[in-house]
Amino acid sequence: MAFEVVTSGRAERQRVAPVRNVIRAGLQIALAGVFVAVVGILGMFNNRPIIVGELTLGYATLGLLFLTTGILVATQRLYASAAHTLIAGLVAGTIASATFALLPVAMSLINLRSVFVALDAPLYKMLTFGLSPPVGIAVFVGLGPVLGFLGALLIELPRLYRRPLAGGLIAVGLAGLFQELLRPILYNSSVTKPVHDLLYGWYGLILQGAIIIFVVTAAGVVIWDRYHDGMTSRYGNLALDTQKRIRWSLILAAAVLGLLFPIYAGNFIGQVLLTVGLFTLMGMGLNLEVGIAGLLDLGFVAFYATGAYATGLLMADSPYALAHLSFWQAMPIAVLCSVILGIIFGIPVLKVRGDYLAVATLGLGEIVRVIVLSDAAAPLLGGAHGVLQIPRPYLGTIELNNPVALFYLTLVASAVAAYAAWRLEESRLGRAWKAIRDDEDVAQALGINLIRVKLLAYGLGAAFAGLAGSIFATMLGSIFPHSFQLIISINILALIIVGGMGSLVGVALGAVVLIGLPEMLREFGEFRYLFYGLAIVAVMRIKPEGLWPSAAKRRELRIDAEIEAVQHGETLAAEQAAAVPEGKA
Amino acid sequence: MKSEAATATGTADLRSKLHGFTYVDAVLWLLRMALLAVVVLGTIGTLNKGTYSASQWFDFFTFGLTIGGVYALIALGYTLVYGILRLINFAHGDITMTGAFSAFFLARSFDRSGFLDEYPVTAMLGIIGLSMAVCTATALIVERICYRPFRHVASLAPLICAIGASFVIQHTFRGMYGNSVRSYPDPEWMKGTIQFGDFSVAMAQIIVFGTAAAAMVFLYLIVQKTRMGTAMRAVSEDRDAAALMGIDANKVIIFTFILGACMAGIGGVLYCFVYKQIYFYTGFLPGIKAFSAAVLGGIGNIPGAMVGGLFLGVIESIGPPLFLDGIGIPAPYQLRDLIAFTMLVMVLVFRPQGLFGEALAKKRA
């Protein structure tokens, strides 16, 4: 079976009639708006200020939706003149807001709350701006055309104005959203504390701060646009050696800053980074199986659980403990246990392929979970109550007891694992994996021992998960079967798909986007799985190669694009050739 | 001479078979033996112990049949779609949940107003109708967004997309209807039991099984007797040839999704009337079990899905007390899901074409 995730599915832009385009954009945005409102995202976002007292995330989302209507319409470039485009944006915005306004109208007439829990009084108050129903709804409807117009205007503006404007708005939004990340960093140092006080008040970003950030960023973008070209050309004129030195010193500086960052940022960020690190570790393992060997494994969490339970049972101060080893003794054993389980898992499903493999591994993962949860295995594994009191690792005499220290442990583990994964991918074994991914039958015909290669994929993939599980067990200090649900497997799958199958940087990037961001934005936390699902579908539809495609995939894409360009050129030439004789006649 | 040649080829066959016999096959044989041993030893142990009476066994059996009918209904959705598109509709379990969860609100209001007790048939038709409508809508949206763009692509992309869709569906409904577990109404006419001599059958089970059976007969008639059903069978046989005969494959695919979703709509409501509760994650278990049932019966095979569902329901209900109790496992009932999952893995590993041997499974894999 050809494991071609990256094939069609790239959303192709069709040309549609201008009027239909306007109506469609308006209705799509209205539908999206109703969806976020009914699901409860809008109401929850409204509790989060971006600029204290001025703008909440909820209103920002609402505004962004209507702004998007104008942008959607304008970027299609279907209209004869700028004025037409602006009018189209205005009309699309009106359609969007008027359709969306049916929701608050319905909410004022009937009580929808008994069925739809999110459609409560605060949301109604938000949608009507706290005004009396007719006035509020009129304001709501009026918001659409204004923002739709502005959105279209933003696209129509010359680059000189558009880039600073957009940059400033985005910077303000980020400064408001990521204040938990930014504020401790600014606050903890006496040098940057005045900056903090200038921008942020007790509750968050203040208006004065927002204006400063907007102006500074906009000015920065203007300056960048002005001098960027000159700088690149001057950089290009430097000797190749100097270029290389500059590039490496920049990378080194970034790495040092990145390494020191968690110490500086405190335990909250440390915890987030730790989780991201653990998922990156598991992602690299699953990446070996799915991304490189093409074996879609939905039971991956079982290996993670094995690593955690083995560590727990070997270290814990509890009645279930088998031994009282130190972390450094227990971890290798835990990893070994995971490898063994990986191979045991792999043997029965060796001949199962494709979709069936996904479901079979899902079944195996669930079998492990059901057994661990049951009373039958409780005397060994603690059943639903789990294994408690697992000690922390010691480095010499230092107890690694806070998230930042554990993060560094994970970082070292990830670095080692990444190196291993990178070398594996380039090895003979890695090439064999890629061969069975692309065509199992051909690979076998070429003399690749399918059994050995596949079992190694399961075993080595499981090793990464076992390592992550081992750290996880000492991080929490206790383990429960409920921590190891199918959802973890799908999380990991989601992050390697979003990051880019088969690409190590992609795995880390996927973990940051899918695990780190929701941790950082508390509000997203509750809906993170909704975002995961949307991200998976969107990536498969729009950018199947992921955010950071592997080098091989990039080459393929570039070649595809070249072929397409050549073909396009040929058709153009053919059309011209066909048009010439007609013109003569 | 002839017989000598025959024995020669026979030994050669045997030798070549033994030559291909690896440690993997040995492990697989061990696995089979171990499972067989558990089943046989467990059965002997339980029957020796005599923990359960005949009427209890009968109860297990009827309950299994009831829940098996529900699995069969949901399994039909997997099998129909697989038959046409050769893909696993991973989100089908969650599609089932959407209908049953939406119908819960109608059932609750019917129950509160007393309509459910007064006009049971009308009320049930209304509840099931709403459930079918919601399931159909969700299934068509999923088809449009996740499957149609990948229709001509043989890859894992639609499966991964469907996994994403399953998440979106679950958490959209969690956001819409809340994350609390809701309890389905329990009308008076569903309580009671009916006596057959020594054995008694719960009224609810008769109703659920009867509805499921009626729905399956109805589906079978549609597939076998109507024009659209004939077109469906033609497309599942060979899509290109069917298209040459003037069948609009697109229409047939949509019709298939509608049919599967309607069965899921009925199955979901019945499942909730058996277990009396629903929340946003309810769809996962019946979904995966129904998929096992579909594979068990040979995926793509409609009667196979029905029989597979009933078989799985009965095994799942009788299995824990019969096989696991006998070998002394405490609280065997907790391992009920284990039986379904083990069965799923075993069928996929040892007999991917299912019990009824349609070789369809090979086409895609």
Image (cartoon, coloured by chain):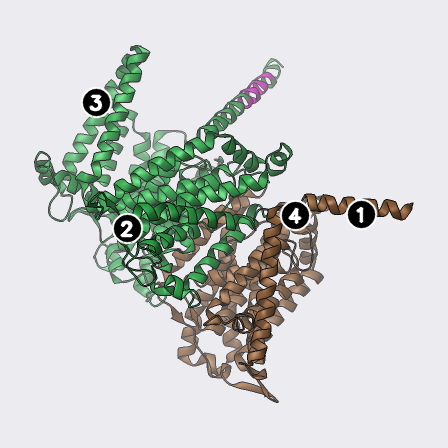
Chain colours: A green, B brown
Residue A289 on image: x %, y %: 48, 41
- Which residue is under mark 1? B10
Residue at 36% across, 58% down: A322
In depth, the one of A153 and A445 nearer the eye is A445
The chain to which mark 4 is attached is B
The chain containing the residue under callout 2 comes to A
Instruction: Compute the Cα span from label 2 to label 1.
Output: 61 Å
Q: CA distance from mark 4 to mark 2?
A: 45 Å
Q: Position of residue A135 (x, y in %)?
A: 24, 55
Q: Amino acid at mark 2?
A: Met
Residue depicted at x 50% and y 57%: B137
Give the magenta range. A567-577
The nearer-to-camera label among 4 and 2 is: 2
User: CA separation, marks 4 and 3?
Assistant: 62 Å
Which residue in the structure is indicated by mark 2?
A: A475
Which tag is nearer the camera, tag 3 or tag 2? 2
Classify mark 4: helix, strand or loop. helix
Say whether marks 3 and 2 touch (CB < 8 Å).
no
Picture quadrant where residue A208 is located = top left
Badge 2 and badge 1 both on one subunit? no
- Badge 4 is on which residue? B362
Q: Label 3, on which residue?
A: A223
Task: Verify CB contact (< 8 Å) between mark 2 and mark 1.
Answer: no
Residue at disc 3, secondary structure: helix
Q: Is residue A572 magenta?
A: yes
Few, some or many residues within 10 Å of mark 3 (<14, 14–19, 20+): few
Residue at (24% x, 40% y) in the render: A174
Image position of B126 with respect to B13: above or below? below
Q: Is residue A314 left or right of residue B19?
A: left
Q: Position of residue B162 (x, y in %)?
A: 49, 50
Residue B186 drawn in magenta: no
